[in-house]
Amino acid sequence: MSASSRELFERAQRSIPGGVNSPVRAFRSVGGTPVFFERAEGACLWDTEGRRYIDYVGSWGPMLAGHTHPQVVAAVQEAASRALSFGAPTEAETELAELLRRLVPSLDLVRLVCSGTEATMTAIRLARGHTGRSLIVKFEGCYHGHADGLLVKAGSGALTFGHSSSAGVPAQIAAQTLVADYNDAGQLEQLFKSLGSEIAGVIVEPVAGNMNLVLPKPGFLQALRAQCDQHGAVLIFDEVMTGFRVAPGGAQQRYGIRPDLTTLGKVIGGGLPLAAVGGRRDIMQQLAPLGPVYQAGTLSGNPIAVAAGLATLKLVDTPGFQERISAVTEALIKGLQQEARRAGVIFSAQSIGSMFGLYFRASPPASFAEVMQCDKDRFNRFFHAMLARGVYLAPSAYEAGFVSAAHGDAEIEATLAAAKEAFNV
């Protein structure tokens, strides 16, 4: 038998900061020892000791088709048999860009990159290069990767400049980002009244998924579009998480808003490192080699990642795919709410497409402040109780959950059976 997670975690901490290569994996939020996994298939994961878990993390979103889908694996194997990397153009890159343009009509041109952070960083640089302005507006609780200018939290007042949320980010850089409250259209209007001529762009998760799942209030996204139009700013939809999960064409299709730039990731790589930035032709033409905004990457458009992405998106782009997975997600949410009521636990939940949120509060939150009102200790107990019963949820009260096409009635029934016991822990 392989080493236990505890043994592997102790070993990892001797060579890797915190024993992990991304902070939330360390289980610091929920306590305990992170699970070390060995393999995955369909809707399930197996740890190094052979225990099986129904997976609702999905590698933090990419595994929309399910783990190790045969068509995706075959595409990766075939591509790998030809080359691991070219650092030069390939036909498959163009095929993926064409498919993305068809699925997301706001994309006139697309540039492939390796990560969501790289995509949002490029989108911000494009907004500034296109407008000649410096300031960017983001929203409290929305996460857009770990570029310096986006690791920013709100200041002490509604119209103050941002403060760094990470050591190593100079105050001068943080001050180029304004932070507003998600779902507060009035606050955004005030920002534009005060500083509209200096604002290059607004970046938003159209459906927030990094402070748990928070849906936009009616009219909020429309207000962003109107303010950007009025003041000549660039509207950036960060659909790294929502792309192909809340609708075939992303949140912008679902809510009928056409952003100027869009960032995509996670699902478009099918589990491999791949992301994209795309949008209006006149803005995208500012990118080198056509324009003065520089962006480059040795592994951009890597043939293995492109093969995985193409195979995944072809599965997603089949009739009934989105409807079926949305129905499964709704069944999960309704079942969890029912079990919580039976147990007398204060709990609420909601879903959109194949994303869902669980909250230990009476109703789903609409802002970062309301998210912080959730009973974190109660979530932590629920998380560990579900983990002990073979259900793997995100190890944080502040992350959205994901369902894959491999989840079906059997997985939902097993999850609800586990929840029936876990709500009483």
Image: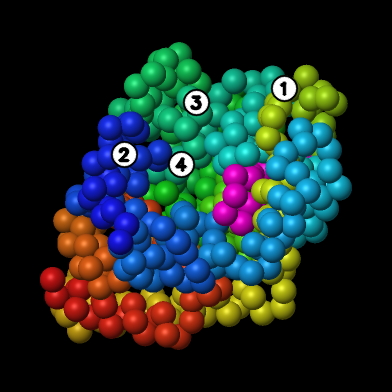
Three-letter amino acid code at the position of disc 1: Tyr
Within 10 Å of the Cα at label 4, are there few (<14), some (14-19), or many (20+) other Cα atoms? Answer: many
Tell me the quarter of the picture where residue 409 sits.
Answer: bottom left
The residue identified by callout 3 is 149
In three-dimensional space, the C-alpha distance between marks 4 and 1, rounded to whole angstroms, equals 23 Å
What's the residue at 47%, 64% (across, down)? 40
The residue identified by callout 2 is 12
Label 4 SS = loop
For marks 2 and 3 on the same chain, the one whose residue lies earlier in the sequence: 2
The residue identified by callout 4 is 143
Label 3 SS = helix
Three-letter amino acid code at the position of disc 3: Gly
The answer to whether the residue labelled 4 contacts the one labelled 1, judged by CB atoms less than 8 Å apart, is no
For marks 4 and 1 on the same chain, the one whose residue lies earlier in the sequence: 4
Which disc is residue 347 wearing? Answer: none
The residue identified by callout 1 is 294
In three-dimensional space, the C-alpha distance between marks 2 and 3, rounded to whole angstroms, equals 30 Å
Three-letter amino acid code at the position of disc 4: Tyr
The answer to whether the residue labelled 2 contacts the one labelled 1, judged by CB atoms less than 8 Å apart, is no
